[in-house]
Amino acid sequence: MNTPERAQPPGSLPLTQMLLCGALVVTLSMGIRHSFGLWLQPITMAHGWTRADYSMAMAVQNLVWGAAGPLVGLWADRSGAFKVLLLGALLYAAGLFGMANTEHSMPFMLSTGVLIGLAQACSTYAVIYGVLGRNISATQRSWAMGITAAAGSFGQFLMVPLASWLIAHVGWDKALMWLSSAALLIAPLAWGLRENAQTLAQRRASQPAAGTLADTAAGPSSAGAALKEALGHRDYLLLTGGYFVCGFQLAFIGVHLPSYLKDHQLEPQLATTALALIGLFNVLGTYAAGVLGQRLRKTWILSSIYASRAVAMTLFVLCPLTPVSVCLFAATMGALWLSTVPPTNAVVAQMLGVRNLSMLGGVVFFSHQIGSFCGVWLAGHLYDLTGGYQVVWWLAIALGVLAALLNLPIREHLAPARRLLTASAA
């Protein structure tokens, strides 16, 4: 890759260290999260709950994750990722412990919904991407974000079969205890993302010197001014609206696909295979999206992803449900799963700079998580009402078309105030 500018500004963390530690953190955090669909039937059967009960806890988890994202991002932008990740490790372990040991719906919602939702806000993309944005120039940013997102996909490929094996061999509750211990590994990995406090303060004061005009356009320094600028930016709002759809689709499929397959009398192991295939092909799709984002318009990539998802889901619903069709669908959706993450965050950085990237990325992600809340809860609610998921499938397809249309007119440019500053700097 041609890099006419410095890949990293002075005082940055080592590139390999950042990518390795960031990738492992996301592998653990997202890998555990992607396995939660395997617990829907064991937990509801053990406690005599409906699917709506479990779905509500998962929906609250997604909503808390999204609502906490901007605040956690602001903290990470100001203080660095280290303390945020430490808190995330502790909250994740506590939430999984509670998920395994609570017998009533309200404590289950508090542990599974609130604690794990906060943990995910502290240990996933917004926090890690803030570190990458501050330490890597725009010439390599999309590629680096693709590497990290692909790691989250590989985590799904690893953790879903592991979770399934643990459930089968030690029971669903003890399996959660093992994952609780695994979540604590995020804490030592946080050391590899610990930024020098003096360097971090200097970058906040002068705007990160990542070597491009976009990065040197200072723009507003306060979080409030940055948020006001973003919310007044038409293209930022369109991007945010499209991300709602991403959350709806992924949360619905990730949590309810295993039960959907079992409802159609398919082998239980097929659900594990499907989720693992999604994770495996997601590694390829997410990395490809990050690389293509260095060469093509990122919003065109996003529009193509959403349109392709709509086509894949339509074929899945209309074709006979067989192990072959399930595997083909899982592989296709896997290639499109988290491939929206690198271009979305790279567009935010390109439009609004990296000084407040974790916070502004967190706002966009909040929209994603509102979509996740709707996708998880609505699927469970409609299942209890209608006895099936067909309505939700067609709603997810229609939303995919809408998201493709929303992303088409987005222009990857600086916000107006930053364009003026860039022009005067040039």
Image (tube, rainbow, N blue to C red):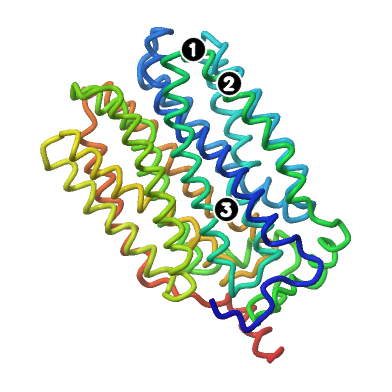
Earlier-in-chain disc, 1 versus 3: 1
Disc 3 crowd rating (10 Å Cα; few below 14, some 14-19, many 20+) is: many
Q: Which mark is residue 363?
A: 3
Tell me the SS state at disc 3. helix
Distance, label 1 to label 3, CA atoms, is 39 Å
Q: Position of residue 335 (x, y in %)?
A: 35, 52
Distance, label 1 to label 2, CA atoms, is 10 Å
Q: Residue 92 carries which label?
A: none
Q: Residue at x 15, y 34 (%)?
A: 321
Left/right of residue 94 with respect to residue 82 in the rendered view: left
- Amino acid on which disc 3 is placed: Val
Q: Which mark is residue 178?
A: 2
Would you identify the image quadrant in which residue 378 lies?
top left
Figure check: 176 above or below 296: above
Disc 2 crowd rating (10 Å Cα; few below 14, some 14-19, many 20+) is: some
Determine whether label 1 and label 2 are within 8 Å by CB.
Answer: yes
Q: Where is residue 95 in the image (x, y as percent from the top left)?
A: 61, 24
Earlier-in-chain disc, 3 versus 2: 2
Figure check: 374 above or below 270: below
Q: Where is residue 25 in the image (x, y as percent from the top left)?
A: 62, 43
Q: Where is residue 213 in the image (x, y as percent from the top left)?
A: 65, 82
Distance, label 3 to label 2, CA atoms, is 32 Å
Of residue 86 and residue 277, the one placed in the foreground of this image is 277
Residue labelled with disc 1: 170
- Amino acid on which disc 2 is placed: Trp
